[in-house]
Amino acid sequence: MIDLMSGLSPAWPVLIAGVLCAVMPWHYARKALMILAPLAAGLFWFLTPQTGVFGVFEAAGFTFETYRFDPLSRIWGLVFILAAFLNGLYALHERDRMSDTAALLYTGAGIGAVFAGDFLTLFFFWELTAITSVFLVWAGRNPAAFRAGHRYLAIHVLSGVLLLAGAIFYANHSGSWQFNAVDVNAPGGLLILLAFGIKAAFPLLHNWLQDAYPKSTAVGAVVLSAFTTKLAIYALARGFAGLEPLIWVGAIMTAFPVFYAVIENDLRKVLAYSLNNQLGFMVAGIGVGTALGLNGAAAHAFVHIIYKGLLFMTMGAVLMRTGSTKATDLGGLYKSMPLTALFCLIGAGAISAFPLMSGFVAKALTISAVAQSGQTIPFLILVFASAGVLEHSGIKIPYFAFFAHDAKKRVKEAPWNMLLAMGLAAFLCIYLGVNYGALYDLLPFSMEAYQPYSLDHIVGQMQLLLAALFAFTFLVRFKLYPAEVPGVNLDTDWLYRKAGNNFVRWSWKMFDRMMGSLGHVRTRIRARLGDRLFNVFSPAGALSRDIPSGLLAIWTSVLLGIVLLIAYLA
């Protein structure tokens, strides 16, 4: 039994639970599946005795590797399973079969993609994540959520199409469908990179994230924050480690969301921009490609899933109790929701990389790797972005939700299951920051020589954090901080959405005109042809007229002669 389980991907118990959840009418049974399925997946992960490729089978002439267990996939698989358990616990109060089913299938697809050893298996799970996750957006059940879900689905299906096309070209060139390091200059290499870049929310490809996540339900946003983008980071680490342009892409990703997050009123959208910012650190580490850089990306992805999930959980609890996550509608909630406020502060400290928090021991790896690579400008951008993280996620989120002006809203504390999920995530934020060896032991490469709690690192980070705190306090005190006002902030997606909308409208108008013109042409041809046929075949037509017998005899003779000539020649 143990040997059988060790050869099966941990994705299968979660996927099977998702299918059962879709047909199961009993609410409590579905919730039990959401807790038990991740535990079963964790057991599969734990019982895998060694690294290797398992679950291999052949079909239609292709070899599918469904379970590649190695140092890189191991850490991603574990944190996905852990996130699935916390998400299931957080969603215990919710009575929504569609959301429960989508969450399990989406989670299973993410785990399956991480353990995929070939491009075809990766593509199958890659598209399954898109198809299942969109229901978490649609679960909002309002027109804005439906429209955002359609845009989200179109973009992610496009990512899958690019991945499949790139994989076909690449396999034809290399002779193998195995998913390993990809040569970006080989046929299909750029298509694969673009497919990964869409899900990783590269600059100009990022707006699906801010469009869809804030429109999902309180639970949906928590689940969405864990898998799609981090799956893309894993794929980049597997396929494009050491691709130097990614250092600059990552640096840009860390910087530009800071400015949007400062002026954004919707706090869940602030977290979506913050997610962009955090992904940039991981992409930069992958671009460096050294053992330290890849360890930094893996460690950052691990802790980020936990503390960003925690922050989305706190905002989900606020949304559930108040009906809004707009900064202009909130304030003073620490009086009504003190535990949620405390957990939010812990998540804010972790994402800001305070010492003794998980972000401190993870983010340092990436920044050190970029510094050691000699990339001075990207290094300075990452340092600036680190201060920006404290400003928008470390301070703005808890300040405007719980401590700013008192909105006089007195509500209940979050449900017990939400508090328990938030409490476990908050515990991990502190535990991994203190007992960082447990995290470093999971990383792909040895970390015996690295010590995060060096004096220069602690002092430098505290100087950065205190400077950011002072700047925020100064700006708020003298009313220089951008006011939180209701409104919609335009991002780069406005360009292609506006242009795309105008192009579609223009194309439809031209098509309508063309069809109208063709209709007139058809009418004219039909009328003229009808007149000609009438003139020939009607009772008053040419064929009905009297023809002189002599002329008819001549034409008959001519035709007979032609027929005889053809017969003779044949």
Image (cartoon, rainbow, N blue to C red):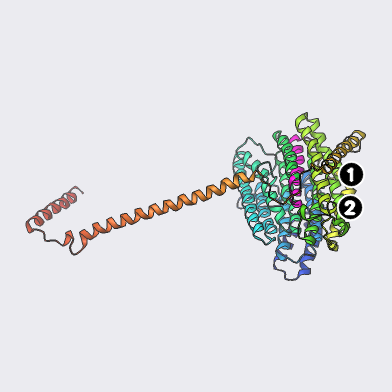
Q: Residue furthest left?
A: 550
Quadrant in which residue 103 is drawn: bottom right
Residue 508 screen position, x and y as percent: 49, 52
Which sits in the foreground, 444 or 510?
Answer: 510
Question: Few, some or many C-alpha atoms within 10 Å of disc 2 (few <14, some 14-19, many ≥20)?
Answer: some
Residue 111 screen position, x and y as percent: 74, 53
Q: Is residue 59 left or right of residue 521?
A: right
Which amino acid is tagged 1?
Tyr
Which amino acid is tagged 2?
Phe
Is the residue 324 above or below the residue 204 in the image? below
Is the residue 123 above or below the residue 239 in the image? below
Quadrant in which residue 284 is drawn: top right
Question: Few, some or many C-alpha atoms within 10 Å of disc 1 (few <14, some 14-19, many ≥20)?
Answer: some
Q: Residue furthest front?
A: 478
Quarter of the figure with the N terminus:
bottom right
Which sits in the foreground, 226 or 540?
Answer: 540
